[in-house]
Amino acid sequence: MTLLFGFAPFLLFAILSRLSADLALWLAFASAFVVTIRDFVESPSLRLLDGVSLALFGILALWRGFVAPELSLSAVRTIVDVGLCLAILVSLIRRRPFSLPYANRDSKGHHWPMPVFLRVNQMISLVWCLTFAVMALADGAVTFLSASFYLGIAVNVVALCFAITFTLRYPMLAAERQAR
């Protein structure tokens, strides 16, 4: 569940971007800052998702606010999706899934053996990587191919719902398989 909290800036951006891209970017940046500082005070280390969200939303808020105010919402969404997808992909290539720092190896009284724990986190990270890739393709189609904005939103919502559901359910399924 703490992993989903790490996505709070992105989810805030996704929800508020329909009102105002600038407002959504600045509030996502503020949210990323709060999440990063809160976690950093508890443990002086920076999680990949927190650092990427902080940098991505901060740079995009400044860029769209002062350099390229004409940058469309769908272009901003595409950049955010690609940025998060690439960060997660790098974590998978390095064999340090981005979800690892959020995971608790001893959750709900079930102690995970390290290989199983790593496999579960690799799978969750892979699903999020693919989710952001699908979202980037949908938002890119809206930006560059003049696809329907509402189709892009629908694809984003379905992809996010799938990733969230998978993140919440897959560890329990893996624990059940491990118990057998």
Image: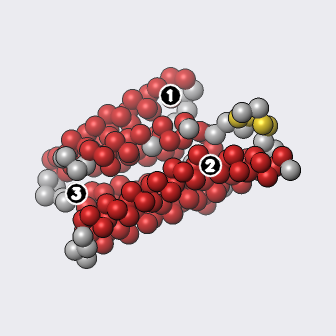
Badge 1 element: helix
Q: Residue at label 2?
A: 169
Instruction: Name the residue at 64% across, 57% down.
Output: 123
Q: Is mark 2 on a helix, strand or loop?
A: helix
Between 32 and 155, the one nearer to me in the picture: 155
Q: Distance between the residues labelled 2 and 3?
A: 32 Å
Residue matched to label 1: 40
Decide if residue 127 is on the left or right side of residue 11.
right
Q: Is mark 3 on a helix, strand or loop?
A: helix
- Labels 3, 1: front one: 3
Q: Which of 65 and 6 is in front in this view?
A: 6
In the rendered view, tell whether residue 145 sits above or below residue 127.
Answer: below
Report the amino acid beneath label 2. Answer: Arg
Task: Please indicate whether residue 10 sits to the left or right of residue 115 in the image.
Answer: left
In this rendering, the label closer to the viewer, 1 or 2? 2
Task: Kindly identify the amino acid type of the residue bearing the numbered disc 1.
Answer: Phe
**Earlier-in-chain disc, 2 versus 3:** 3
Q: Is residue 41 visible?
A: yes
For the point 65% across and 55% down, the residue is 122
Separation of residues labelled 1 and 2 (CA atoms): 28 Å
Q: Where residue 20 sits in the image (x, y, percent)?
A: 18, 47
Q: Distance between the residues labelled 3 and 1?
A: 31 Å
Answer yes or no: is residue 114 visible: no
Q: Which of marks 3 and 1 is nearer the N terminus?
A: 1
Instruction: Residue lying at the far bottom in this picture: please name it.
Output: 145
Residue placed under numbered mark 3 in the picture: 73
**Of 177 and 83, the residue lying toward us:** 177
**Quick one: quadrant of the N terminus?**
top right
Identified by mark 3, the residue type is Leu
Mark toward the start of the polypeptide (1 vs 2): 1
Q: Residue furthest top?
A: 41
